[in-house]
Image (cartoon, rainbow, N blue to C red):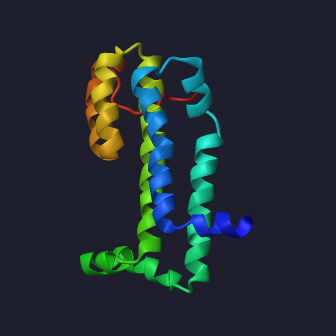
Amino acid sequence: MLIEFQDYLTFENIYIWSNIFVFPFWLMLIFIPKSKITQIFINSIILPLLLASAYIFVFYQIILFEEPIFDLFQLYTGLDSLYTVFSNEGFLLLFWLHFVSINLFLGSWISNDGIKYNMSLKIVVLPLILTYFSGPVGFVIYWLIRVFYAKKLRIHDQVI
């Protein structure tokens, strides 16, 4: 039974399931952000823990395949090196899981912040959708909208 499960945990399946896994949470953020179930799932440790577990598993598999982990440092030496690192399926999946995790975190923050400032769901939907596809673009659009609602340029509140 365990061997069958391990055989199922291919990089391709992890990629597919990670995308399927996060999609319902994005739907909750977009359509029912104020619901209790959305707040429970989005504000809990469950999502980051599951995505981090997948990340750690993929990293472990890369080590088992004896891929040179130090190749990751080539990311900073130029686009050709970046292309070389991303040509490795394991490293590409690591970065995809990173992208999915960060975007979901950002979407959660946008949703909660929109609720905090009583923004209409109709206004927050576009930045959330853009964040799903391209985190920074959605975030900047949300921030520009937020400036008018919160009357603040900062993205976090001052703690005194």
Please count the marks in the image.
0
Can you see residue 152? yes
Image vertical order of residue 136 relative to residue 97, above or below: above
Residue 66, by quadrant, is bottom right
Q: Quadrant of the C terminus?
A: top right
Residue 147, by quadrant, is top left
Q: Quadrant of the N terminus?
A: bottom right
Residue 128, by quadrant, is top left
Image vertical order of residue 104 relative to residue 57, above or below: above
Check the image and name the residue furthest to the right.
1
Which residue is located at x 61 percent, y 69 percent?
7
Is 90 or 1 nearer to us in this picture?
1
Can you see residue 146? no
Q: Position of residue 14 (x, y in %)?
A: 51, 59
Which residue is located at x 42 percent, y 59 percent?
96
Is 119 or 11 nearer to us in this picture?
11
Q: Position of residue 30 (x, y in %)?
A: 39, 26
Tell whether 113 sits left or right of 50: left
Is 16 or 30 nearer to us in this picture?
16
Which residue is located at x 35 percent, y 24 percent?
152
Q: Position of residue 53 (x, y in %)?
A: 63, 57
Which residue is located at x 40 percent, y 33 percent?
155
Q: Position of residue 98 (x, y in %)?
A: 47, 57
